[in-house]
Amino acid sequence: MGISISYSLTLRDPGDLHHVLNAARHFAVQAGWQVQPLAVGLVLDPGANCEPLVLSPDPSGVLTDNVKTQFAGPAVHVQVVSLLDHLRPLLSTLEVVDDSEYWDTRSEVALREHFASEAALIAEARHGLAHTSILQALTYWLRIIGICIAVFVGVVGVILVLIWVTEHLGA
C-alpha cells in the first residue's frame, strides 16, 4: 500500500552531473521546493508531506531513489514526474516505476482516483483498528502468519521434491 515513484537515471557522462543538477535546481526553485546541496548532488524537498528527492550519483553515474508522494497528493506527484521529464533529455537512461501508473498513462483523472482509493483504504484500516479489539487483531495477524508459514513450507517441499527428482531420476 502506498504511492511512490522509484527512478533510476544514468548520466551520459559523469561530467554531465553539473548540467543535470543545475537543471534540477532550476526546476525545484521554480516549483517552490527547498534545495539542499550535498557534497556530490542535491536534495530536493517538495514539502507538502512528500519525501525529498535525493540526486546523488554512485561512482558509475547512476542516481537511484524512491519518493513517496502518497501524503503529498496528486499535484505534487505530477510535479515529481514533471521533474523527471525535465531531466530526461540530459540523461543516457531513465527508468521509472510509478505505483499510480501516472508515469505511463499521464491520466490525471486516473491519478486522482488512485490517490482517493489509497486514502479510502487508509481510512478503512484506521476505522477497523479503532473498532477492533486487541484479541481480534492478534487473531487476524496470527492467521496471516500461519498462511505465510504454510506457503513457505509448501515452497520448501516443492524444492525438496525437485532436488530429489533431479538427483534420482534426472542425472
Image (cartoon, rainbow, N blue to C red):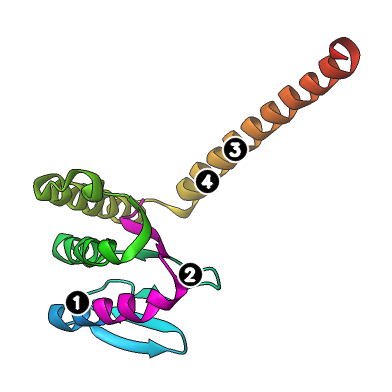
Which residue is identified by label 2?
61
Which of the two discs, 2 and 1, labels the residue nearer the N terminus?
1
Disc 3 + disc 1, Cβ < 8 Å = no
Instruction: Quadrant for the C terminus, please.
Output: top right
Secondary structure category for the residue under label 3: helix
- Residue flagged by tag 3: what amino acid is it? Cys
Q: Nearer the viewer, residue 7 or 72?
A: 7
- x, y percent for residue 36: 34, 88
Q: How crowded is mark 3: few (under 14 residues within 10 Å), some or many (20 or more)?
A: few
Disc 4 + disc 3, Cβ < 8 Å = no
Q: Nearer the viewer, residue 20 or 101?
A: 20
> Between marks 2 and 1, how big is the CA–CA gap?
21 Å
Relative side of 67 to 116, left or right: right
Q: Nearer the viewer, residue 84 or 165?
A: 84
Question: Which numbered tag is attached to residue 27?
Answer: 1
Q: Does the magenta stretch include residue 2?
A: yes
Which residue is identified by label 3?
148
The residue depicted at 39 percent of the width and 77 percent of the height is 17
Q: In this view, does 78 lie above or below 32?
A: above
Q: Nearer the viewer, residue 152 or 68?
A: 68
Q: Give the range drawn in magenta.
A: 1-24
Which of the two discs, 4 and 2, labels the residue nearer the N terminus?
2
Question: Which numbered tag is attached to residue 141?
Answer: 4
> Between marks 4 and 3, how big is the CA–CA gap?
10 Å
- Residue flagged by tag 2: what amino acid is it? Gly
Q: Between label 4 and label 1, give the one nearer the viewer.
A: 1
The residue depicted at 21 percent of the width and 49 percent of the height is 102
Q: How crowded is mark 4: few (under 14 residues within 10 Å), some or many (20 or more)?
A: few
Q: Is residue 145 above or below residue 48?
A: above
The number of numbered discs placed on residues in the rendered structure image is: 4
Q: Between label 3 and label 2, give the one nearer the viewer.
A: 2
